[in-house]
């Protein structure tokens, strides 16, 4: 039998490789590389007002926001050789909290948590990222194929960050929306100084800051940082602030029923003691007058 007949037969039954065969090494590698090898939970905060519709992931506005953020975040991770995709699981209140996942294949080594965090925080986005609240957690798989999370990384290693929200009696003015305005700057300094009267009582306190003011009397979105090793609970912080308002240590006209402290797990503590005494009512009035003087 001539070779021009034998060779095609051998190729057909698999003894010889066929040029361009779909089962060659390049295709095999491509299939392998498309499999997710490394997965990370990613949480970051956008300095913007949370819309209740964002809780509904099927809402058109939410879908638009989701696609926009996915596009911009994916662009900063694309230079990593084994980056596959970024996806958003949900939005939460606290400015706008984004819960998502990062996926990488095995074509390169596992990216470090610190590098992933730095890449995001250094990204150029159309939205403002609160970089001190970025958290990335590696997802590992146990022998039972049950997903578990491991070491978390935030921008400031070893720092526990709490979101703090409350409402103050007072007239909201438009310049408070601009955090660089003199009115917002003066009020920020005053609020931080008063909050620190309470929070500096915790030895692990690092700093207190204000993210924004919102309309509704005056709604304050703030944050408090502590050393993670000896950080207090959200419940302890909410109680301490409410007690400070009640006792007159904090000279802010805070409606204690609106105090909310949220920790990194998403747990929110509320503390609203009854302000029934005439002395407390008088103190709230004086605090309102003091606040008005600071703003003007």
Image: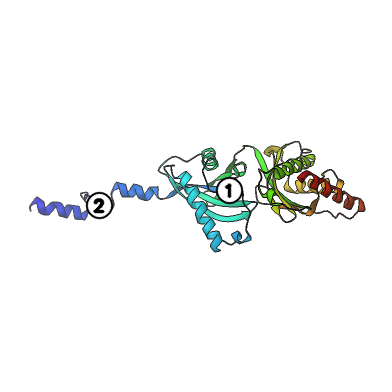
In the current view of this chain or complex, which residue is farthest to the right?
A: 278
Tell whether 295 sits left or right of 73: right
Q: Where in the figure is residue 236, as x and y percent of width and height?
A: 77, 46
Q: Where in the figure is residue 33, as x and y percent of width and height?
A: 39, 47
Would you identify the image quadrant in which residue 210 lies? top right
Q: Going 57% across and 56% down the picture, which residue do you hit? A: 90
In the current view of this chain or complex, which residue is farthest to the bottom?
A: 59
Q: Point out the tag, 2 or 1, that comes first from the N-terminus.
A: 2
Tell whether 9 sits left or right of 121: left
Mark 2 in CB contact with mark 1 (< 8 angstroms): no
Front one among 87 and 123: 123
Tell us which disc is closer to us: 2 or 1. 1
Q: Going 75% across and 43% down the picture, which residue do you hit? A: 191
Tell whether 137 sits left or right of 203: left
In the depicted structure, whether residue 226 falls above or below residue 221: above
Mark 2: give few (<14), some (14-19) or many (20+) Cα within 10 Å.
few
Q: Residue 43 has which mark?
A: 1
Q: Going 53% across and 43% down the picture, which residue do you hit? A: 120
* Quadrant showing the C terminus: top right
Q: Going 77% across and 39% down the picture, which residue do you hit? A: 193
Mark 1: give few (<14), some (14-19) or many (20+) Cα within 10 Å.
some
Quickly name the residue at label 2.
21
Q: Where in the figure is residue 6, as x and y percent of width and height?
A: 12, 53
Separation of marks 2 and 1 at Cα, in angstroms: 44 Å
């Amino acid at each position: 039998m001539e070779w021009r007949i034998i060779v095609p037969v051998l190729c057909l039954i698999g003894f010889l490789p066929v040029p361009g065969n779909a089962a060659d090494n390049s295709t095999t590698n491509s299939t392998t590389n498309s499999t997710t090898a490394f997965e990370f939970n990613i949480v970051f905060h956008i300095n913007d007002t949370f819309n209740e519709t964002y809780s509904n992931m099927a809402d058109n506005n939410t879908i638009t926001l989701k696609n926009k953020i996915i596009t911009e975040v994916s662009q900063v991770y694309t230079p990593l050789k084994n980056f596959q995709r970024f996806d958003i699981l949900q939005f939460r209140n606290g400015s706008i909290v984004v819960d998502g996942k990062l996926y990488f294949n095995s074509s390169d080594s596992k990216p470090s948590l610190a590098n992933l965090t730095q890449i995001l925080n250094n990204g150029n986005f159309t939205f403002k990222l609160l970089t001190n609240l970025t958290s990335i957690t590696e997802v590992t798989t146990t022998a039972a194929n049950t997903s578990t999370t491991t070491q978390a990384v935030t921008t400031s290693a070893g720092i526990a960050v709490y979101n703090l929200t409350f409402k103050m009696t007072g007239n909201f003015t438009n310049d408070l929306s601009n955090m660089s305005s003199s009115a917002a700057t003066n009020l920020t300094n005053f609020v931080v100084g008063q909050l620190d009267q309470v929070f500096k009582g915790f030895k692990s306190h690092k700093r207190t800051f204000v993210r924004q003011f919102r309309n509704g009397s005056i709604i304050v979105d703030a944050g408090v940082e502590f050393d993670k090793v000896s950080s207090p609970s959200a419940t302890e912080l909410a109680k301490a602030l409410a007690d400070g308002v009640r006792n007159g240590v904090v000279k802010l006209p805070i409606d204690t029923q609106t105090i909310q402290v949220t920790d990194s797990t998403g747990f929110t503590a509320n503390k609203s003691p009854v302000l029934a005494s005439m002395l407390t009512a008088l103190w709230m009035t004086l605090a309102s007058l003091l606040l008005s003087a600071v703003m003007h």
